[in-house]
Image (cartoon, rainbow, N blue to C red):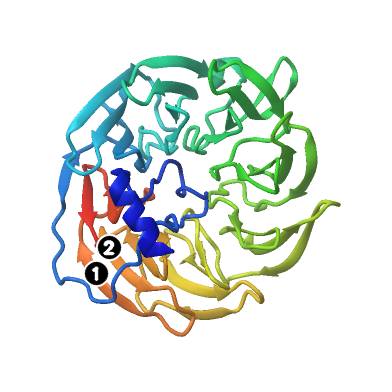
Amino acid sequence: MRPLLLCLLLLTGLPAADWPQFLGPTHDGRAADAEPALPDSLPSELKPLWEKSVGSGFAGPVVSDGRLVMFHREGGDMTTEALDARTGKPAWRSTYVTDYVDSFGFDNGPRAVPAIAAGKVLTFGPEGRVTALDSATGKELWRFDTASELESPQGFFGRAPSPLILDGRVIVAAGGTRKGSAAGLAALDLKTGVVAWTSVEDEAGYASPVPGREGEILAWMRNQLWRVNAADGALRASMPLRSSIDASVNAATPLPCGDNRWLVSAGYGVGAHLLRLTDAGIEEVWRKDRALDCHYATPVRVAGHLFGFHGRQETGMKLRCISIATGEVAWECPDGLPGGTLLAVGDKLLVVTEQGELWVVRASAEKFDRLASWQILGSGHRSHAAYADGVLYARDSERLVAVKLR
């Protein structure tokens, strides 16, 4: 089926796959099945197809219909740009003025990855502005200010969860209130930006909302994990889940693990939790401390194992593989790192380290097997990369690169 599908895609002139939102086409860090597998034999050197200078922020790129979209900050402007994904040639550019200042002086740019669907690009700025742009022209279609309309607080590092487009709605984790009612989550009409519903009384964290069971949204916020109906925001279930330390964050997004099971993990003593969503609520399958404590990067699942970064960024991380069934550690990379992010393409992992290296690692539970590594970026950055049609798109604090891997 895979060779036939690839032939059909080539004949129709369509890209093999897209990466239209945070964590890719299926919200789990995996490339689409239409993407051919990466080879075991890889070149010793890797030169970018193209590269481009970028402003501040930790929002990674997205790709749809042969076009890449980047959200970053240039001086006092929050900038959304569309580029040809193969050449880097500019298509359009849209900006708005911002006065956002990070509370910790860490970075004044956006954190939330854009989302593309139904001919629209959605961004969520750290100052709280949700903006809908026409994906063909960059024309602003509507805007919504969560700070003024929902009393969304800035938090430690501004508004950071990526928007989720689902069933004609834009779901944002605002962590606010609306006319005295809870508005931790808000659903905006995709066409108009009008509020469709608000729900849950909680502060926003840094994990992004994702589709849960059919017709539901799963959102890990500052204090609890929430299950709500996608249609009206009605609460299905919740589970208290956070560190007792005030200076802590929930940043890794809940990851689907099959059979209605989800991995939820954080550092600061929270640990890794495998949870099952049932008709009655949320039940814990297992909990493991110091097995896969995810500080900021969401892990990926390949077959019956999870691959991700364990440990705090300040003290060093290790890339690990753990069993979904038991939570036991199968292996860990012997090299310590400040941190990094990863995604999966078939049976390979693409790891972008905070040192600016790209690793290709075999997604096997037997041992850590790094097939290749290249220096593609500068150090000190932690945004998630995108992968579409055999090309990896990654950025640091100064530039965006496109590297072809097949």
Asked if residue 195 is positioned above or below residue 236 in the image, the reply reads above
- The residue tagged 1 is 373
- The residue tagged 2 is 358
Q: Which of 8 and 249 is in front in this view?
A: 8
Q: In this view, does 126 lie to the left or right of 284?
A: left
Q: Horizontal and vertical percent for residue 77?
A: 30, 22
Asked if residue 144 is positioned above or below residue 296 in the image, the reply reads above
The kind of secondary structure element at disc 2 is strand
Q: Quadrant of the C terminus?
A: bottom left
The kind of secondary structure element at disc 1 is strand
Q: Horizontal and vertical percent for residue 169?
A: 59, 28
Instruction: Report the amino acid beneath label 2.
Output: Leu
Q: In this view, does 234 lie to the left or right of 7?
A: right
Instruction: Report the amino acid beneath label 1.
Output: Ser
For image coordinates 46% across by 49% down, the residue present is 23
Q: In which quarter of the image is the N terminus?
A: bottom left
Asked if residue 232 is positioned above or below residue 308 in the image, the reply reads above
Mark 1 and mark 2 lie on one chain; the one further toward the N terminus is 2
Q: How far apart are marks 1 and 2 (CA)?
A: 5 Å
For image coordinates 32% across by 35% down, the residue present is 69
Near mark 1 (Cα within 10 A), the count class, few <14, some 14-19 or many ≥20, is some
For image coordinates 69% across by 68% down, the residue present is 287
Q: Are marks 1 and 2 in contact (CB under 8 Å)?
A: yes
For image coordinates 60% across by 78% down, the residue present is 328
Disc on res. 385: none
